[in-house]
Image (tube, rainbow, N blue to C red):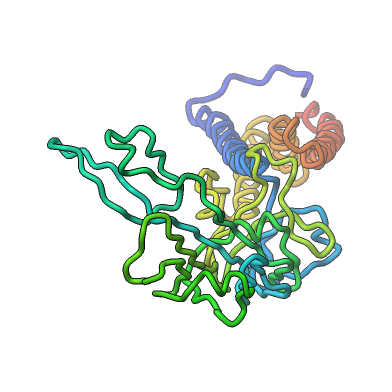
Amino acid sequence: MSGERKPPLSIRELPWPALGAVILLIGVGVAAITEKGHIDYRTQMQRHGGDVLNLGSDGRPGADEQGNMVRVVGPVQVVEEPLDQLFNQQSNQPVLIRHVQMFQWHELRLGGPVSYELDWEDHPIDSSHFEHAQTHANPGKFPLKSARFDAGLVRLNDFVLDPALIHALTGSRPMTPDLRRLPSNLAASFSLFNNSLVTSAVPSNPQLGDLRVSWEVVPVQDVTIVAKVNGNQLVPASDAADGVGFAVQSGNVPLADIFPDLPVPPEYAWLRRIGSMLLATFGTVLLLRWHYQRIDPVLAPAIAVLVMGAVDTVLWLGHDNARAGWWFVLTFVGIALTVWRVRALAPVSAKK
């Protein structure tokens, strides 16, 4: 660049350009590691529906959140209660679950002669394969089925939960049925015993084929939900690679605990970027001090921006082209400033 061959480096001068190159590479390396950490994090988040805006307990529907994944925390609020129409049982909790059991024969083989006992089961037991099937025949198909009833409308803060999110709520607690709400035809067949409805003539002594119906609810609770915003609704992300597109957890749960497969994003990213820029600039200063025998306050950071921008542009290409575009703009600015300062310094260097 100077037009003249530089004299050989002295022993005293030799470490400075090498040190400058090492410091420049360290700065660029720190920047690359920071961006790679964000890329890995965002790539994994795309499997679950995309980047998540952490709205916390203050999350409310708004224009800025539309189409984005959000994390919202708060108590669920039941607006339209679930109803078991067959038994006319209703709850002010978000989910109502009916369990149906029948008193049936079990065949026991414990190494000795076959034995039989009666017990409650939630599915039909096929007795046709019993060794003594004729004397221990089960009734077969249940006349009633177990069922789950989700609330028609549930809110979290001001968000309306999609049915899939309501269905994913967890937890349980037994519910005592209300005999006064039973339809007359069922009231004649069932009686209340130990928080369940039974068809037994003597509830404490059930017989083969008797039915037992009980209910449990998923209670109102504080939850953490990660889902996509659609208007005033929280809905599953239909394009999520994991095939789910949402998460529902009881309590206030951090994002890292909801998705344990997520890599930890780099902390203090902007401080790391600024620090890496300062390192790269300092390394460039040492190189320029050796080459030009002077320090240019514009050229050193321009070269640092150029090198860091080029590396980060390549890293982000194919992952987030918008982010890659911003790094390319910085790279172009670095190139322009570098060319300008090198041309300005060329005559000065030539004179030396």
Residue 120 appears at what percent x and percent y?
A: 37, 56
Residue 253 appears at what percent x and percent y?
A: 53, 63
Along the viewing direction, whichever of 144 and 342 lies nearer the viewer:
144
Image position of 104 (left or right of 69):
left
Q: Which residue is the extreme one toward the left? A: 112
Q: Which residue is the extreme one toward the bottom? A: 180
Q: Residue at x 47, y 74 (%)?
A: 191
Along the viewing direction, whichever of 186 and 228 lies nearer the viewer:
186
Image position of 206 (left or right of 338):
left
Residue 267 appears at what percent x and percent y?
A: 56, 54
Q: Residue at x 74, y 55 (%)?
A: 235
Residue 254 appears at what percent x and percent y?
A: 54, 60
Along the viewing direction, whichever of 323 and 176 lies nearer the viewer:
176
In the rendered image, the vertical position of residue 251 relative to residue 70, given as above or below: below
Q: Which image quarter: residue 42?
A: top right
Q: Residue at x 76, y 38 (%)?
A: 320
Q: Which image quarter: residue 35?
A: top right
Q: Which residue is the extreme one toward the top? A: 5
Tell me if I can see residue 285 in this picture.
no
The N terminus - image quarter = top right
